[in-house]
């Protein structure tokens, strides 16, 4: 695709560097999260734990590539993402319930305010009801 564009070679090199940076930062984030989860929620797991998780993840990716190529990696990605899809669905349901609960509470507040305004309009306070400070 880049051959059809101006500066195709330069754009190809830049795209490759950006993909490499993306994979490195994603891998670093993944090892950090896995390290945090395996140490009971420690926000700063040791470097040894992160290196072990990094080697395990790299080993899984390498074995998938060697045994089934890119198709195996794509299949594994889809299979591993299915449980997360369930979590996302549960999050959507939770968000919908929370928004609905907030909306109902706001409706109650508006009805109470309207009721209070009607009471004030129908029975205005008399001048004698006001308290004057000495």
Image (cartoon, helix red, strand yellow):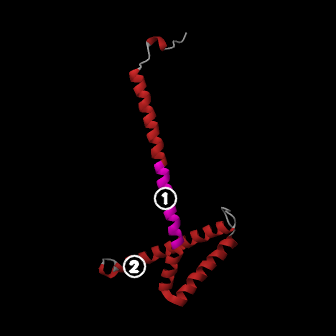
Q: Is residue 83 left or right of residue 10?
A: right
In the image, residue 53 above or below residue 39: below
| Residue indicated by mark 1 | 93
Of residues 89 and 12, the one nearer the viewer is: 89
Q: Using the image as rendered, state which of residue 8 and residue 108 is in the foreground.
A: 108
Q: Quadrant where the C terminus lies?
A: top right
Q: Report x, y in % for residue 111.
A: 43, 35
Could you give the CA–CA distance between mark 2 and mark 1, rounded to whole angstroms?
Answer: 42 Å
User: Within 10 Å of the Cα at label 2, are there few (<14), some (14-19), or many (20+) other Cα atoms?
Assistant: some
Task: Note whether 102 is above or below 46 in the view shown.
Answer: above
Please provide percent x and percent y for residue 57.
60, 78
Location of residue 1 with respect to 50 vertically, above or below: below
**Proximity of marks 2 and 1: CB atoms separated by less than 8 Å:** no
Name the residue at 51% across, 60% down.
Answer: 91
Quarter holding residue 12:
bottom left
Task: Give the percent coordinates (x, y) of residue 116.
Answer: 44, 28
Residue range in magenta is 82-100
Which numbered circle lies on residue 12?
2
């Amino acid at each position: 695709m880049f051959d059809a564009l101006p500066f195709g070679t330069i754009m190809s090199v830049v795209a490759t560097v950006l993909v490499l940076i993306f994979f490195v930062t994603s891998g670093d984030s993944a090892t950090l999260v896995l390290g945090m989860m395996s140490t009971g929620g420690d926000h700063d797991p040791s470097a040894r734990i992160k290196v072990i998780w990094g080697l395990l993840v790299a080993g899984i990716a390498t074995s998938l590539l060697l045994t089934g190529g890119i198709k195996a990696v794509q299949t594994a990605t889809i299979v591993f993402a299915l449980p997360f899809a369930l979590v996302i669905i549960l999050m959507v349901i939770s968000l919908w319930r929370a928004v609905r609960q907030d909306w109902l509470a706001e409706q109650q507040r508006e009805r109470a305010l309207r009721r209070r305004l009607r009471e004030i309009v129908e029975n205005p306070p008399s001048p004698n009801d006001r308290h004057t400070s000495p």
